[in-house]
Image (cartoon, grey):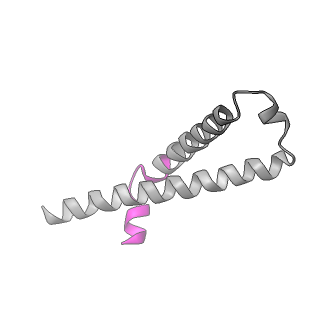
Amino acid sequence: MFSKVISLQGFWKSVFSLGIAFIVLFVVVKWAIEGFKMEYFTAIQNPVNTFLGLLLCGFIYGFLVTFGKFRAKLKKDEVQ
């Protein structure tokens, strides 16, 4: 089932788009909590680790949500 789901057309495109959306929303919400001060961006101690961490979290989020969505679609199609 796992390989069947990840091989569906549009799966990886959806993972990528949801991951990017997660990263953007996460940064904007966190920036809003800090009061939209530009110091939020300059206070990052290690920007490379922050960027890589955001990419990893975005990928995990996008993969889990997309996998669930596509798996539900497959199960629905199999029942009918």
Q: How many marks?
A: 0
Give the image quarter of residue 31: top right
> Eyeballing the image, is 10 above or below 36?
below
> Eyeballing the image, is 3 above or below 36?
below
Please indicate whether residue 30 sits to the left or right of residue 60 in the image.
right
Magenta: main secondary structure equals helix
Residue 79 pos. (x, y %) = 15, 65
* Residue that lies at the very extreme toward the bottom in this rendered image: 1
Nearer to me, 70 or 34: 34
> Eyeballing the image, is 65 above or below 1?
above
* Residue that lies at the very extreme toward the left in this rendered image: 80
Residue at 75% x, 27% y is: 37
Q: Quadrant of the C terminus?
A: bottom left
Residue at 49% x, 52% y is: 12
Q: Is residue 3 magenta?
A: yes
Give the image quarter of residue 24: top right
Residue 4 pos. (x, y %) = 37, 67
Residue at 56% x, 58% y is: 60
Residue 17 pos. (x, y %) = 51, 42
In this picture, which residue range is highlighted in magenta?
Answer: 1-13
Nearer to me, 56 or 9: 56
Residue 52 pos. (x, y %) = 73, 52
Q: Is residue 37 magenta?
A: no
> Eyeballing the image, is 71 above or below 46?
below
Please indicate whether residue 4 sits to the left or right of residue 58 in the image.
left
Q: Quadrant of the N terminus?
A: bottom left
